[in-house]
Image: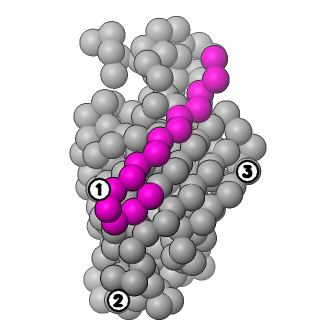
Amino acid sequence: MSRVGRVERVTKETSVLVEVGLDGTGRVEVSTGVGFYDHMLAQLGKHGLFDLTVKTEGDLHIDSHHTIEDTALALGAAFREALGDKSGIRRFGSASCPLDESLAQVTVDLSGRPYLVHSEPEGMAPMIGPEYDTTMTRHILESFVAQAAVCLHVHVPYGRNAHHVVESQFKALARALREASEPDPRATGVPSTKGVL
């Protein structure tokens, strides 16, 4: 079965196309108009071994908020679609990824119930480059979780450089999602006593 999700989301603020293949090789084609965000989405595809296409046109003449948010919403919806009924997957995944002085710890449950716990070091630089507000990282995760319907815990216990703090989160998220969405060779059916996820 092909585990691919494709979502198109068009509003008066943005036009977004996302396609994600869970059983890919890490092939990434990303264009949002926000350079640092493109870099983070590339980390997600590469380290998750997801084939990821993202094409977003947004109202960047206002700021990058709508572009970043709507892309994350479409990404979550595409990921949920690609998972199908979740039969035979591992369901849970966790990863810790360092990036120089920063460490990110991510745990995910593909539970069907959206919930986010997120913590970062205080006092981070407010911007990375000219367009990425560092408060958007949490909002990206909130938007992704809401549409993917997953339980996600992201914790950065330490880190100084804002670029490193954010990038370590995307890398750890990629690895945790990869583990959780992989087929479990010992499992049959949906990994839940409820029978559905």
In front: 81, or 85? 81
What range is drawn magenta here?
1-15
* Spatial separation of the CA atoms under disc 2 and disc 1: 19 Å
Q: Return the mark for residue 142.
A: 1
Element at label 3? loop
Could you tell whether 79 is left or right of 122 in the image? right
Which label is found at residue 126? 2
**Rendering quarter of residue 22:** top right
Q: Nearer the viewer, residue 66 or 185?
A: 66
Could you tell me what secondary structure mostly forms the magenta stretch? Answer: strand
Q: Earlier in the sequence, mark 3 or mark 2?
A: 3
Amino acid type of the residue that numbered disc 3 sits on in the rendered structure: Arg
Mark 1: amino acid: Glu
Q: Residue at x 40, y 88 (%)?
A: 127
Badge 1, how many Cα within 10 Å: few under 14, some, many 20+?
Answer: many
Q: Amino acid at mark 2?
A: Pro
SS under mark 2? loop
Of labels 2 and 1, earlier in sequence is 2
Give x and y (percent) for residue 113: 25, 34
Q: Is residue 83 above or below residue 99?
A: above
| Cβ atoms at labels 2 and 1 below 8 Å apart | no
Residue located at (56% from left, 58% from top): 55
